[in-house]
Image (tube, rainbow, N blue to C red):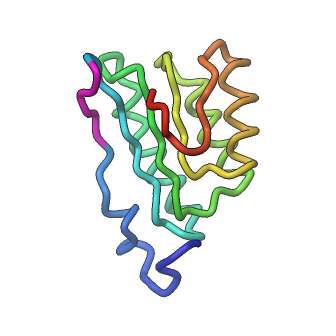
Amino acid sequence: MIKNRECPPEELPGARKKSFAMFYGGTEIWFEHLDGMGRHTGLVKEKFLRGAASFQRPSAPSLFALNAAETRMTRELAEKIASVLAKGKKLFFRVAVVGCGPWGEASFEKRLPAAGRTRPLCGKLSGGL
């Protein structure tokens, strides 16, 4: 269920959360937070593209996790995110996506392997990266 419908877009939880790299299991994982942004897909796209400069640096982690829970993932938004990940200079060994819905799953599973990237993990993260 998408919450915070009455909240101004810039005050949504996902708009305020910072994306970051975290050490886990002997390596680092980049966590991109796009969750809790409801139907504000323009704001989601803007935040993702701003963060792309950070997670596509050569020194950034090669494991990538995207949290899109409680954000409406449209086909256009899912394809834009998958396209940025697939066409970027950074090669991600593993991409995990939470809350992407059926359009997101199809977009990620189609675009990332076709670009020579790893097969993404979509849905709930229970087994870890």
Q: Which residue lies furthest to the bottom in this view?
A: 6
Q: Nearer the viewer, residue 64 or 45?
A: 64
- Which residue is located at x 47 percent, y 79 percent? 4
User: For residue 65, which quarter of the picture?
Assistant: top left
* Label tally: 0
- Which residue is located at x 44 percent, y 74 percent? 9
Main secondary structure along the magenta-highlighted residues: strand
User: For residue 24, which quarter of the picture?
Assistant: top left
- Which residue is located at x 54 percent, y 69 percent? 38
Residue 87 x/y as whole percent: 60, 24
Inspect the magenta stretch and tell me whether residue 52 lies in it.
Answer: no
Q: Nearer the viewer, residue 124 or 118?
A: 124
Q: Which of 71 and 90 is in front in this view?
A: 71
Residue 42 x/y as whole percent: 57, 62
| Position of 43 relative to 7 (above/below) | above
Left or right side of 111 for 99: left
Q: Which quarter of the rendered picture does the C terminus lie within?
A: top left
Q: Which quarter of the rendered picture does the N terminus lie within?
A: bottom right
| Position of 122 relative to 118 (above/below) | below
Left or right side of 82 for 25: left
Q: Nearer the viewer, residue 51 or 95?
A: 95
Residue 63 x/y as whole percent: 42, 24
Magenta region: 20-25
Q: Residue furthest front?
A: 127
